[in-house]
Amino acid sequence: MKNFKPLFVVATLLCTILFFPNCRKDDTSANKKLANTPLAKAEFDSSNYGIYKGVFVGSSGIVMININNDGTISATITINGVEDHFTTKQSIEKNKPTNLSFIDFDKNIFDFTVDESGRGATISNLRMNGHINPAIIVVKETSKTLVQCFEGLYYTTPGSSGATPNGLFNAVFYDYHLYALIRTYDDSENYTAFGALLNGQFTTGAVMDQDVSFTGNIKGDKISGTWKSNNGAYSGSFSGDRTY
């Protein structure tokens, strides 16, 4: 699975670096209990304020962005059990389009954009030291809709016994919808996929150069399924676990 063109650019490199103090990394490798109820407050369900959750690829990780849900603005990216805390000095207004630049202690950076009602959350200008072509997708959590984050792998057959993964399959599940971020190991390309859960199963639209679709299910804290190319030349499986 090489030389696929992404449907759209999820993250690009930023040429300038801003500085904000008081950011640090915390080792949180101990298992955390997964939430069963949303963190988001009802008063912000239709606002730019609130909670945004998502997944990271570069390595594999999860993301949480707090936009004044508790009166503060912050972001956390957790990779391999280590929390990386981001802050901003910018201020925003409620129910207004939002553009924020975040930075951590090591000068990792990204921009966060969302409209006045919390739709269209986007991460851009992402730079994480030690990660080639990193990417993030995030969605807004509401008081009625818990966002669940899954980290997993996909495998290719033929040409692979299935023992060695060919890339990452990380996804967020919310309101019976799946939003996946897929990364190939061979060329570090990132792709996105969308699907809806129906009768316990989802199927994504075509991704990876309009040629590949994923079909699977979510059972408890597990996600799994199969994928195939439209021309039948490639197929395989994927699986993962909920980590947030």
Image (spheres, helix red, strand yellow):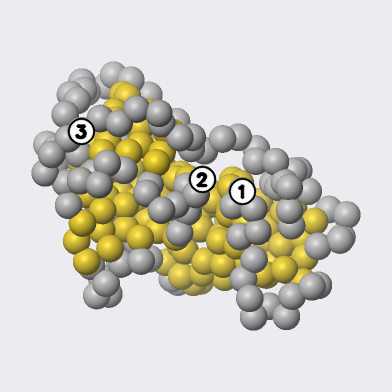
Q: Residue at x 32, y 24 (%)?
A: 99
So how many labels did they put on this image? 3
Q: Amino acid at mark 2?
A: Asn
Does residue 164 appear left or right of residue 70 in this picture? Answer: right
Secondary structure beneath disc 3?
Answer: loop
Res 7 quadrant in image: top right
Pick the residue in front: 68 or 85: 85
Q: Write down the quadrant of residue 62 in the picture.
A: bottom left
Q: Position of residue 147 (x, y in %)?
A: 38, 52
Badge 1 is on which residue? 189
**Secondary structure of the residue carrying numbered label 2:** loop
| Residue nearest the observer in this picture, 128 or 38 | 128
- Tell whether label 1 touches label 2 (CB within 8 Å): yes
Mark 2 and mark 1: Cα distance apart in space: 7 Å
Residue 169 at what x, y percent from top left?
56, 60
Sequence order check, earlier mark of 1 and 3: 3
Asked if the residue under mark 3 is in contact with the one under mark 2, i.e. CB atoms within 8 Å, the reply is no
Mark 1 Cα-neighbour bin, 10 Å: few <14, some 14–19, many ≥20: many
Whether residue 225 is situated above or below residue 86 in the rendered picture: below
Q: Residues within 10 Å of mark 2 (few under 14, many from 20)?
A: some
Residue 144, compared with residue 226, is above or below; it is above
Against 10, is 202 above or below? below
The residue drawn where x is 47% and y is 63% is 151
Q: Amino acid at mark 3?
A: Phe
Residue beneath label 3, please? 19
Mark 2 sits on what residue? 133
**Can residue 50 be seen in the rendering of this structure?**
no
- Seen from the viewer's position, the closer of residues 187 and 28 is 187
Q: Residue at x 21, y 56 (%)?
A: 25
Nearer the camera: disc 1 or disc 3: 3
Query: First in sequence: mark 2 or mark 3?
Result: 3
Q: Amino acid at mark 1?
A: Glu
